[in-house]
Image (cartoon, grey):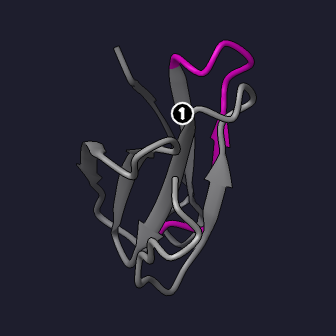
Amino acid sequence: MKLSNCIKFSGFSTFSKNGNLLSISKGTNIVIYETNNLKKITRFNFSSQVIQIEFSPDSNYILIGLYKVNEIEIKSLK
């Protein structure tokens, strides 16, 4: 990744445990990028604003906290 690469967002972001992935919340969406080239891997849409993002230790899953609707969702990245 070049330091001049830029992603515009307002929300939460988290690096995966191995540092290979970056998750960024954009309102009710989460976008997952590869960190080495900022290529978009996947996008998830939710019913409420994302408040928390956590990767599993093996970076195969992501936990999403939707606390305004009292929900936590887990999504597979494989």
Instruction: Give the camera-side residue of 56 and 7.
Output: 7
Q: Is residue 24 above or below residue 37?
A: below
Counting from the top left corner in percent of width and height, residue 40 is at 27, 48
**Magenta stretch containing residue 20, yes or no?**
no
What residue is at 67 percent from the left and 42 percent from the top? 54
Instruction: Give the camera-side residue of 44 and 9.
Output: 9
What residue is at 39 percent from the left and 52 percent from the top? 38
In the image, 11: left or right of 44? right
Residue stretch in magenta = 50-60
Q: Is residue 76 above or below residue 17?
A: above
Residue type at the position of mark 1: Ile
Counting from the top left corner in percent of width and height, residue 31 is at 35, 55
Instruction: Give the camera-side residue of 70 and 9.
Output: 9
What residue is at 61 percent from the left and 70 percent from the top? 12
In the image, 51: left or right of 50? right
Quadrant of the image occupied by residue 57: top right
Counting from the top left corner in percent of width and height, residue 8 is at 41, 84
Q: Main secondary structure of the magenta part?
A: loop
- In the picture of the structure, the residue carrying the numbered disc 1 is 62
Count of marks placed on residues: 1
What residue is at 50 percent from the left and 66 percent from the top? 50
Quadrant of the image occupied by residue 72: top right
Counting from the top left corner in percent of width and height, residue 6 is at 44, 77
Quadrant for the C terminus, please. Answer: top left
* Local crowd size for mark 1, using a 10 Å CA cut-off: few (<14), some (14–19), many (≥20): some
Q: Is residue 33 above or below residue 2?
A: above
**Magenta stretch containing residue 51, yes or no?**
yes
What kind of element bears circle 1? strand
